[in-house]
Amino acid sequence: MKFAVIVFPGSNCDVDMYHAIKDELGEEAVYVRYDEQNLANYDAILLPGGFSYGDYLRSGAIARFAPIMAEVVKAAEAGKPILGVCNGFQILLEAGLLPGAMKRNKNLKFMCRPVTLRVQNNETMFTSAYEIDEEITIPIAHGEGNYYCDEATLATLKQENRIAFTYADNPNGSVEDIAGIVNEKGNVLGMMPHPERAVDKLLGSADGLNLFKSILRNWRESHVTHA
Amino acid sequence: MYKVKVYVTLKESVLDPQGSAVKNSLHSLSYQEVEDVRIGKYMELTVKDTENLDQRIKEICEKLLANTVIEDYTYEIEEGVAQ
């Protein structure tokens, strides 16, 4: 399986993402620059964390207009798995691929520490290797992860079972303890915590690896050709 | 040439964590009369003469300068700014 790791000016978790795919999942990963205009050859798209364009104006606001984003939108429409982590999630929100917006953390602090997440939906292509209600340890590292959406949107997210992960102990003020959501079709996941930083016990946790394994397993199930 | 002054603030329905912190600080400085603080952004655009100026400024605000999921914007257009 071939993963594209999108690199924006100011991305800083691209190498972690690449490492997670290449060395831990054992699949192919390729860095794709923000100014490229073709994602046709990739099976999955990863938008890493960081501070794209210095977070100027709003996190993700400028990155969403980078040339590669038109391709990301196309890939989303084609049903390819798209994962946005941290700043990647913020970019997906700004691009309108996921609903809602991010505010400054409730306590106004940049927080960087492992947190406990609860798997709310294990029927997505990103979470099927987890148990429902499983508690996993994944690090967060953000100053603007306070997820907001209006009540109508929240009702829709709940009704359509689109909340993938919640915080066991809400660190940032997000509505309904939301840590990660998927789009209507279920092929776009945005989450503030960093699964790519939790893919080996040496890193403190390997709980993030099942997310990447889920993507791979679901891709194989839908692409295996029987000889 | 025009000078366009754009103000972006969080919507009334959206809690403003920065505003709350500043309000608490003002209270601790004994300015108890301050009931609420909302923090926003102020941007100045210098814009060449163009057709549909008002419409284009609106587009600029909605596409990029404000995130209308959580923010409101207003703007003022000043004419005849010296270059």
Image: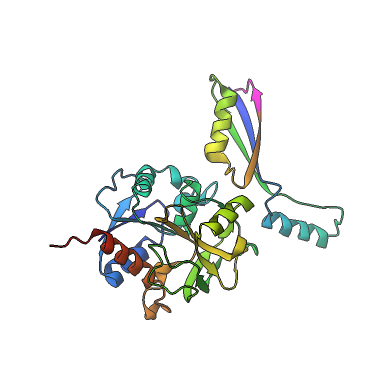
Indicate whether A171 appears above or below B9.
below
x 58%, y 31%: residue? B58
- The answer to which image quadrant residue A171 occupies is bottom right
How far across and down, in percent of the image, does residue A79 sit? Answer: 35, 51
How far across and down, in percent of the image, does residue B40 sit? Answer: 66, 46
How far across and down, in percent of the image, does residue A69 sit? Answer: 39, 45
Say how many tags the image has: 0
Magenta stretch containing residue B80, yes or no?
Answer: yes
Whether residue A139 is visible to the viewer of this picture, yes or no, is: yes
Q: Which range of residues does the magenta coloring cover?
A: B77-83
x 56%, y 21%: residue? B52
Describe residue A174's horizontal placement relative to residue A187 as left or right: right
- The answer to which image quadrant residue A50 occupies is bottom left
User: From the image, which quarter does the N terminus of chain A lie in?
Assistant: bottom left
How far across and down, in percent of the image, does residue A216 sit? Answer: 30, 65
x 78%, y 52%: residue? B36
Q: Nearer the viewer, residue A52 or A100?
A: A100
Magenta stretch containing residue A77, yes or no?
Answer: no
User: From the image, which quarter does the C terminus of chain A lie in?
Assistant: bottom left
Whether residue A114 is visible to the viewer of this picture, yes or no, is: no
Indicate whether A162 appears above or below B41.
below
Q: Nearer the viewer, residue A201 or A222?
A: A222
Extreme residue in the left direction = A227
